[in-house]
Image (cartoon, grey):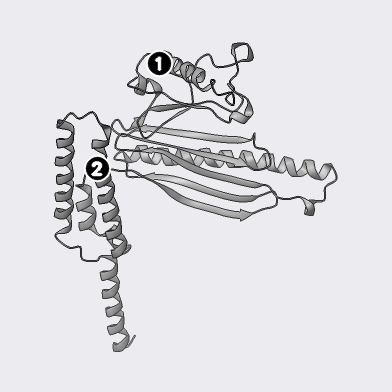
Amino acid sequence: MNQWDNENMSKINKLKKIYENPEIPQELPQVIQNVIKKVENERNGVINMTIKNEKSKKPYWKKIVAIAAAITIFVGAFGVGVSTNEAFAASMENVPILGALVRIFTAEEIHETNDVSTVDIKIPEIDGLKDKDLQEQINKDVQNDMNKAVEETKVVLEEYKQARIETGTKEEDIVLPELVADYDVKCNSKDYISFKIWVTQDFASAYYQEFYYNYDLNKNSKVTLEDLLGKDYVLVANEQISEEIAERSKDENNVYFGENDGGFESITEDQTFYVNENGNPVIIFNKYEIAPGYMGMPEFEIKKDK
């Protein structure tokens, strides 16, 4: 490499370093903290006024959202390098709410067509847990659960294809069904993370699998219905579900099975649920379990403070 090449490589490396580690204005952390402090003071003032009108609390949350949006715009303006800048990252760790949230993101996407289906898969991961062992275990469980469900669905799709061929359909005339795997975040707060993964295909809607993951971020462990509702969680949940079924049944379009038809009697020890943004558990029943198929998968929010 000649001198000209060396000089140009040196310039390129300098430019790369600037791009990857842009200079962050020294005032930024203090500005953010000042705004946070101002909003907190206003929030405390609202609470201390003991005004019952719930509308009086809304400006606080609007400002928190505005702060988050402003910082997002700032990060976007500086590009990818900001996210890896140590000074900036350190300053964000001290900002309430923004520094504490766990990320749940798409780690891998698979889009392909094989001999039995078209495939559209999104696999999530979580990042930002303080307990890295727990974080690794959750990600491993998600990967294993999704892989198992996808493989089982592929077997169903292969059987579907063979059945069509055996009944006289030419292989080239078979419309390939779609295999879909995705996830849905139910709650991501300072106290809980709750999300589900699901796998299905579009030719037989009854074949559907889902898995829920609920964790207490303060205890760094799985959260149970007993954790959320107390030792009498079965009675608490049963009472609210029964009341809600009676209320919903006032609408003639809502139909639930009666006692003689195998309708709702009680939740089970391994009852499926997720945690919503209110921090309340939401009980889920399978299709056809307590209601006709057209009612889908009924859900019931169980309020902790009722």
Residue nearest the viewer, comparing 52 with 80: 52
Residue 272: x and y, percent?
A: 49, 26
Q: Quadrant of residue 278?
A: top left
Q: Is residue 223 left or right of residue 246?
A: left
- Residue 59 circle label: 2
Between the C-alphas of marks 1 and 2, the distance is: 34 Å
Q: Quadrant of residue 263?
A: top right
Could you tell which of marks 1 and 2 lies nearer the N-terminus? 2
| Residue drawn 22% across the image and 43% down it | 96
Above or below — where is 47 with respect to 173? above
| Residue drawn 35% across the image and 23% down it | 228
Amino acid beneath label 1? Val
Amino acid beneath label 2? Pro
Residue 42: x and y, percent?
A: 16, 41
Q: Is residue 220 left or right of residue 46?
A: right
Q: Is residue 139 left or right of residue 153?
A: left
Q: Is residue 163 left or right of residue 24?
A: right
Residue 230: x and y, percent?
A: 34, 17
| Residue drawn 62% across the image and 38% down it | 152
Furthest-top residue in this view = 260
